Image (spheres, helix red, strand yellow):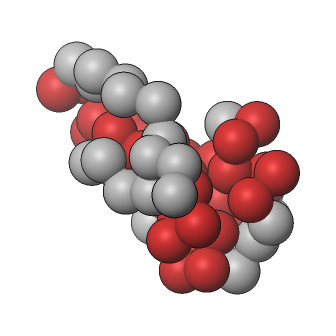
């Protein structure tokens, strides 16, 4: 099991990522990346992030 690398976010960064992660714009890549970073910052494992967001572990580890 590999836990995502610890990420410390400022309140402003967390708010912006949360805003992006809830977006309905055609920029779905930005939405996915924002969700990955937020979940990693919350300490989720890569395998859990990938299964919840329906993406590969490689994608998760890239972000």
Q: Which of 43 and 34 is in front in this view?
A: 43
Q: Where is residue 47 in the image (x, y as percent from the top left)?
A: 58, 67
How many numbered marks, from 0 up?
0
Q: In this view, does 21 lie to the left or right of 11?
A: right
Query: Which residue is rendered at x = 28% and y = 21% of the image?
Result: 8
Q: In this view, does 12 lie to the left or right of 52?
A: left
Residue at screen point 34% across, 39% down: 41
Q: Position of residue 28 (x, y in %)?
A: 75, 63
Query: Residue 29 falls in which quadrant of the image?
Result: bottom right
The image position of residue 43, as x and y in percent, is 30, 47
Residue at the extreme front of the image, as rendered:
1
What is the quadrant of residue 61 in the picture?
A: top right
Q: Which residue is drawn at 45% across and 66% down?
A: 22
Would you say 61 lies left or right of 37 here? Answer: right
Q: Is residue 59 above or below residue 13?
A: below
* Front-lying residue, 14 or 44: 44
Which quadrant would the C terminus be assigned to in this image?
top right
Eyeballing the image, is 4 above or below 50?
A: above
Q: Position of residue 14 (x, y in %)?
A: 29, 35
Q: Is any atom of residue 3 visible in this view?
A: yes
């Amino acid at each position: 099991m590999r836990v995502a690398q610890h990420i410390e976010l400022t309140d402003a960064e967390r708010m912006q990522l949360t805003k992006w992660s809830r977006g309905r714009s055609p920029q779905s890549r930005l939405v996915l990346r924002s969700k990955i970073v937020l979940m990693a910052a919350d300490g989720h494992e890569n395998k859990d992030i990938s299964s919840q967001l329906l993406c590969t572990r490689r994608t998760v580890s890239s972000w």
